[in-house]
Amino acid sequence: MYASRMSSLPPYLFARIDEMKGEQQRKGVDIIDLGVGDPDLPTPQHIVTSLCEAARNPENHHYPSYSGMPAYRSAAADWYKNRFNVPLDPGKEVLALMGSKDGIAHIAEAFVNPGDYVLAPSPGYPVYRTGTLFAEGIVHEMPLTQENNFVPVLDDIPKKVVKAAKLMFINYPNNPTAAVAPDGFYSEIVDFAKKHHIVVVSDNAYSEISYDGYQAPSFLETDGAMEIGIEMHSLSKTYNMTGWRIGMAVGNADILAGLARVKTNVDSGVFNAVQQAAVTALRGSQDCVKEACSVYQERRNVLISGLRDLGFDVPSPKATFYVWLPVQDCMAFSARLLNEAGIVATPGIGFGSNGEGYVRFALTRPVERIREALERMRRLDL
Ligand SMILES: *Cc1c(COP(=O)(O)O)cnc(C)c1O
């Protein structure tokens, strides 16, 4: 009944974990879910109020414009200018997205012919792969390993793959490894992409979630980046707005025009009231972001020191709300955590073959729950 491409879609490991979690819950186990990358903190009140007001205005009840409201696109451009000192023309260099997943899932349709290669990090956000599969492209996994600081080694990509590559995804601060982009890395990417005519898509969903004074850059700050690339950004993680579905693609106007043309044919834009609330988020006080980061930072400190007390050698992340823990066998480890301690952690293999040997914990539960999880792990004698 199903099309053959359906069999190449990810084997839904995440659905399997949900099933296992359901089994435990039915047994009455009090589950501590550190699996999901979805903030537990609420959307800040001033943003919610702004949505309520905008929702009452009948002018907002019509089809939105495809590319986004001018007010939203200029708020996004001003935010990029203030935050990264990257100037953007809101008319041509900013496109509204229904969350960055929307842009990531559709970009390959605009640039990839059947048989072309797409370079994607492994482990990585699963949508880089699915978007490529829908366009009938071939994914070349760039391994992110501890030895190379979780950054792809461009010289390791086979020549024939480089030649046939159309698109490259990069993602720093990184999900799931929590790595940040080392100095000089983005310039290396720009040189490589220019030389081989590859479109670069930087996924910067976690730029605002950082600790200890670290500030993540935008790929577009790099000389030459605007000539070959775009960046996907999102309000989801920054303002606890995962359910609202709003983000933006910014950067090279021609690349964005390709994505916009695909999207014009598959969706009809983001609800105007959501865009107005997003303007409030981007233009308003950013104290709420600082507060969220200090909450995650405390949780990170508790989890990292607890894991180290248990004998794990785990680095303390500078950004994202994830902890990437090296373990022997990721499926066995996460199954044991769930079945013997009621703790959900995501096996690394769910993010690609190079995720084996790790599990990912999300810092999206209150600090008392993280302490409780550590106590249960201590009793497990891992
Ligand atoms: C959460 C996430 C996204 C997408 O989030 P949206 O809600 O669709 O904006 C994109 N990339 C990575 C790496 C993520 O973790």
Image: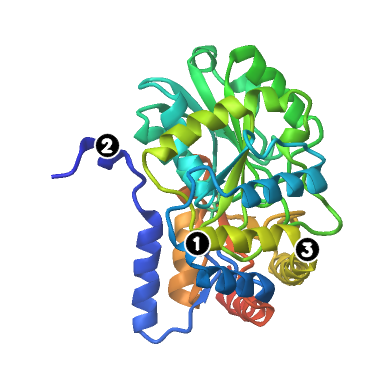
Secondary element at tag 3: loop
- For marks 3 and 1, give the CA distance: 26 Å
Secondary element at tag 1: helix
- Indicate the position of residue 256 as horizontal and vertical percent values: 56, 32
User: How many neighbours does mark 3 have within 10 angstroms: few (below 14), some (14-19), or many (20 or more)?
Assistant: few
Which of pointers 2 and 1 lies earlier in the amino acid sequence? 2
* Furthest-left residue in this view: 1
Give the label, 3 or 1, closer to the camera: 1
- The residue located at (64%, 20%) in the rendering is 193
Give yes or no for contact between labels 2 and 3 (Cβ–Cβ under 8 Å). Answer: no
Q: Which residue is mark 2?
A: 5
Give amino acid for label 3: Gln
Give amino acid for label 2: Arg
Secondary element at tag 2: helix
Give the label, 2 or 1, closer to the camera: 1
Q: Quadrant of residue 159?
A: top right
* Furthest-bottom residue in this view: 28
Question: The N terminus appears in which quarter of the rendering?
Answer: top left
Q: Which residue is mark 1?
A: 60
Image-based side of 301 in relation to 158, left or right: right
